[in-house]
Every structure is written in structure tokens, then in C-alpha cells.
Amino acid sequence: MTKQDIFDAYSDYIMPTYTKMPHIFVKGKGMRLYDIDGKEYLDFFPGWGVGNVGHCHSSVLSAVRDQVGKLIHLPNNYYHPAQAKLAREIVRNSFDGKVFFSNSGAEANEAAIKLARAYGSKFDTPKYEIITFENAFHGRTLATVTATGQRKYQKGFEPLVEGFKTNLPFNDFSALASAVSDKTVGVLLEVVQGEGGINVAENGFVSSIRRLCDEKKMLLIIDEVQTGLGRTGKMFGYQNYDIKPDMITLAKSLGGGLPIGCMLAKREIADTLQPGMHASTFGGSPIVCKAALGVFKAIIKDKMLGNTQKMSSYLFAELKGLSAKHKSIKEVRGLGLMAGIELNINGKTVVEECIKHGLLINCTHDRVLRLMPALNVTKRQIDLAVRTIDKVLQGVSYAG
């Protein structure tokens, strides 16, 4: 197919649910993507948070190649080794509990919501209400888009699902405490809001939520879809705080590019879901579980957590320098290799100009540039990205 054939096929046969950029990519390796014309790009936002180990990491490729010729799919009423090994690996790197496998982050959060409600139904006064925060993002199914609380994602899908209190101020514990009722079963939290603009939860806020959940017999559910698998410098984002959640949800980077999600719950909660109460046809299939095992192998064997911590310090130092140079930058914030550059101008033009210069980044909430490079990023690659953003910002007008 020619480039125009591809553009036309998308227009004719694929629903217009995504705002497209006029680039056709055909190959990826590490931090690099290559378009149909052979042009090379430095990818500082691989797969919207999917590429923690980069594109086509050798550990993921070898794991998938080993499995694909043996067994691709198996119904979940049977056993297979890869799922058992992956569940054990997740638990060993987090907290004692049991795993439910899904295909995506939204499905993982749906599973967490259902488990929380099933848990809450056993109280004398049933608990079902879940509290979420302003600028949260938890998915696009009806329940998770309700939990997200952002009107721009909800419009046209009313009536929304009942049982959620949304848009509570982030990092405001007193507002949360005031919102809790005898119907509240849990709090759903991102320790770093990704889509919401790279907003980092304060230590005191998170620890206070944990204490409140203990006092009120509520569940603390941490959405680790973006923060999980080393992104923050720890294997899971919650490990930056002195707490243990009751549940976490994972997806995005877990499969190294293949679709897999999961929900991990503490052992005493997990068995609330009995046969028939929840299921997934493709969740935890052999091939995606082997891919996920390859991701864990890459992170651990290649010592990516240590590199993330070192490169995080370097990246933020460089971005702070950039901020001092450009009045168009309002703030630099983030955790690990999850960086946000809040601008005083609209970020769309900046993203487009960066792409022209061979750098792929993202903009969320109109003004926040998102940088989430692979965990094995190098100083040289950070230097190139920062130089490119610097050059682009020099050419963008700012009337502040």
C-alpha cells in the first residue's frame, strides 16, 4: 500500500476515535521509531506509556517467539505455566495477594471496582461507593469513565454509572475525609496522575488515605497502569510511599507492547470473587504472559530501576535548566521517568514542531508536555530530547 492508500483505508474503514497525526510508522527498536520513508525518530513517549523497556526488547521478543509456536490461547478453566509464573512474579515484586488477568487497564480497573463492590456487599450496611479525584483517568468503559470524572470523556454517554464520588481535589485530605460516608467502600488513586498532567501525590496525602481506609474499613486501590513496572524508579509507584494498598491495577507496559492488564488484591480480599463472578476470555493467555515475563526479566536483568533513578535526576536537572531559560515554561514536575513540562502556551504546536525535528512527545491538558522515555534511556538521548525542545521553544512566540 502507498502512503495515500493507508490514509484512505483509515478514513474509509476505521472509526474516527483518535486524532491522527500524519505519520506512518513501520519499525521500532529501543528508543527509536522509523516511518514508512525510513526517517528515524527519538521516541520519548513510547506507546502512551507502554514502552517501559523500549520497542522490541530482546527479552520480550525471545519470550514471544518461544511461546507462539507452542500455544497461543487457552481458556481460563485450564492451567498453563506462563500465567502461574507471571502471577508469582507480580506478587513477589509487590505484596502478598492474588491476581486477576485482563486485557487492558480499563478492564483491570473494572475488575477492581467489581471486587470492591463485592467486598462491600458483605457489610451489614452495604458499601459500594468509590471516591476518585480531579484530573484522574481510569479508563473509558462506562464504569471507569464515570470514575475518571472528566466531563470531556463522559459527554454523550449518559446516564453514567451510579456509586462514584468524583473530582475531589487532589492532595487535599480534608476534602476526602469530608466526602466519606457509610456507603464508601474504597478510594481509587493514581500516585502520579499521568493523563491528568503529571501531578504527583504528596507523601502525607497518601499515608493519610491509608490510615483513613484502615479506620473506616475501606479499600485503597492504586491505579498503576502508567506508574507500574519501574516508571517511577520503583517497580510500582506506591513503593515510593510508606504504605501498602489493598489492590493495584496494571496494564500498558506490562506486556511490552502486547495487550495485558491485571488486578492484584490482598489475599484476604481476593477470594471474594468466586467462580462465575468475573471472567475474561483472553485475560492472561500464554503468549501475553510470556511477553510480560520478558518485561520483568528485562527490568531486573538490565538493572533498569537503577538507571531510571539516575536518569531521572539527570533529566529533571536538564529540564529545570530549560525552565530557567524559557518564560514559556511555567513548571517542571514528575517522578522517576514520568516528567511533565507545564507551559504558559498551548502545547500542540510544540509537539508538532518536535515531531518535525524527529522527537516524539505528548501534550495533555492542552499545556503539559509529557515525557516518558524507556527506562534504559541514556544521557545522550536525554540531551538530544532537551536540545530539541529548547530549539522548538525558541521559535514559539510567548506574550507573557
Image (cartoon, grey):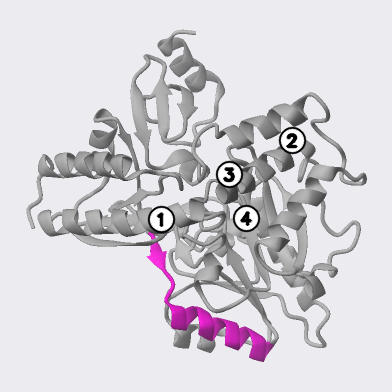
Q: Can residue 252 be seen? A: no
> Could you tell which of marks 1 and 4 lies nearer the N-terminus?
4
Residue 383 covered by magenta stretch: no
Q: Which residue is mark 1?
A: 338
**Of the two numbered discs 3 and 4 in the rendering, the one whose residue sits closer to the viewer:** 3
Q: Which residues are magenta?
A: 198-216
Q: Residue at x 45, y 83 (%)?
A: 204
Q: Which residue is mark 2?
A: 287
The foreground one among 119 and 207 is 207
Image quarter (top left, top right, bottom left or bottom right) of the C terminus: bottom left
- Disc 1, disc 4: CB below 8 Å? no
At label 2, which amino acid type do we have?
Ile
Distance between the alpha carbons at the discs numbered 2 and 3: 17 Å
Q: Secondary structure at mark 4?
A: strand
Q: Secondary structure at mark 2?
A: helix
Q: Residue at x 47, y 44 (%)?
A: 48
At label 1, which amino acid type do we have?
Met
- Disc 4, disc 2: CB below 8 Å? no
Q: Which residue is mark 3?
A: 298
Mark on residue 6? Answer: none
Q: Secondary structure at mark 1?
A: strand
- Above or below, comparing residue 252 to residue 271 in the picture: above
